[in-house]
Image (cartoon, grey):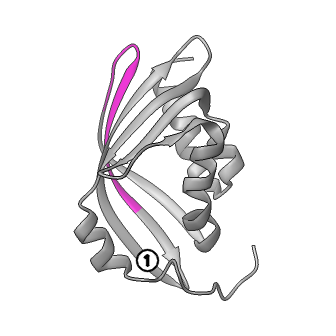
Amino acid sequence: MTSEEIVRRFLDAVHSRDPARVAACFTSDASYANVPHPPASGPEGVRAMFAPILDRSERVRWDIVSECYGTHRAWLERVDRFWIDGQEYAIECNGVYELDRDRGLITEVRDYVDVGVWRARLGDVLAATPDRAR
């Protein structure tokens, strides 16, 4: 697989809102860091990290602002959009992806986001009880 195909598969999984499908994009020893938080480890850690927001969202779309692909690395500037209880929450993010092209999987992600902006925009919406069943 090309680097772009690996990343597109991951983005499609995020958009599907299926944490297991997201986790399947990662190697067994992968890490996913939402900097400055400690990284999630392995597919199960990635699934657990994504589940709360994907389960709470009615829709998810990560818009790519700019992207660059190397042989084993990708850089994506994104606007991550989550619709929760009918309201859109958007946050700017920059991600660095380390890729295993032979296996078509992600070995590491480092996402950089302003946590203060994230908290100001989302507040405690993720702690609220969802109004819908998934």
Q: Is residue 78 magenta?
A: yes
Q: Residue at x 36, y 68 (%)?
A: 90
- Give the extent of the magenta segment: 68-80
Which residue is pictured at 43% across the width and 65% down the height? 81
Residue 13 within the segment the image draws in magenta:
no
Q: Depth check: 91 or 64 in front?
A: 91
Q: Amino acid at mark 1?
A: Glu
Q: Residues within 10 Å of mark 1 (few under 14, many from 20)?
A: some
**Is 22 above or below relative to 24?**
below
In x, y percent, where is residue 94? Answer: 28, 46
Which of the two residues, 17 or 116, is positioned nearer the viewer here?
116
Q: Position of residue 105 (x, y in %)?
A: 58, 25
90 left or right of 133 in image: left
- The image shows residue 92, relative to residue 106, as above or below, that is below
Q: Which residue is mark 1?
A: 88
Vertical relation: 59 (above or below) 21: below
Residue 56 image point, x, y percent: 60, 73
